[in-house]
Amino acid sequence: GSWYDADIDRVIITEAQIREKIAELAKQVSADYTTVEDGLLLVCVLKGAVMFMADFARALGRHGPAADLEFMAVSSYGQGTTSSGTVRILKDLDRDVAGRHVVVVEDIVDSGLTLSWLLRYLASRKAASVEVVTLLRKPEAVKVSIPVKYVGFDIPNEFVVGYGLDFAERYRELPFVGVLKPDVYARA
Ligand code: PRP
Ligand code: MN
Ligand code: MG
């Protein structure tokens, strides 16, 4: 058994599935940006996207184009399992994105709130183009019209943790994506 067996109900996406999917996504993005002259600017949305950013950037590095890595931290969920509706910037970009071809790297698009806010923000900062790569997307997200060009997995409408995704800051370090046992929420 593992330390998390008491908390994890089941794994929905395995480490191997994540690895394979990231290789595919990196090939797609690489093929779509062969002509950018100043390379790509990857914007990781911390904290959730930290694992995906690290693995995706490395996978892209096998194919090109060159990419700069930038990090923003925003939060809309706080301690809960539903979006608060307010997106807070905890850490802003430290480089100018004006004129750059930006790819936002997200772990999950759920309500779409975080991303719709972020896309408006990057547009106001005059990025030359902005696309999104997300590892996970929930059906809810389809209700909000945000253009997400690269999607790893569409998943059912359940709260998931692991591979960067947290519940009250925990479980981010799990190497897979899984669902918590109901009593974990009861305990919290
Ligand atoms: C989570 C997740 C996405 C966002 C998706 O971040 O990492 O960024 O929510 O939800 P939405 O589509 O409903 O906006 P969270 O606010 O929990 O911050 P974190 O990444 O630091 O965990
Ligand atoms: Mn996040
Ligand atoms: Mg979170």
Image (tube, rainbow, N blue to C red):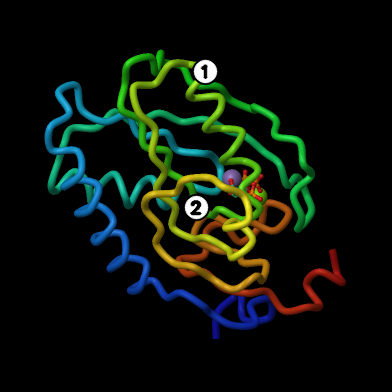
Label 1 element class: helix
Residue shown at 25% from the left, 47% from the top: 29
Mark 2 and mark 1 lie on one chain; the one further toward the N terminus is 2
Q: In which quarter of the image is residue 156?
A: bottom right
The answer as to whether callout 2 falls within 8 Å of ligand 1 is: yes
Instruction: Bin the neighbour count of mark 2 within 10 Å (Cα to Cα): few under 14, some 14-19, many 20 and up.
Output: many
Q: Left of 6 or right of it: where is 126?
A: left
Label 2 element class: strand
Residue shown at 39% from the left, 32% from the top: 130
Q: In which quarter of the image is residue 22?
A: bottom left
Q: Left of 139 or right of it: where is 99?
A: left
Q: Nearer the viewer, mark 2 or mark 1?
A: 1
- Does 163 sit above or below residue 116? below
Residue shown at 15% from the left, 40% from the top: 64
Q: Which residue in the structure is indicated by mark 2?
A: 107
- Does 134 sit above or below residue 71? below
Residue type highlighted by circle 1: Ser
List x then y, in percent, for residue 129. Answer: 35, 28
Q: Which residue in the structure is indicated by mark 1?
A: 124
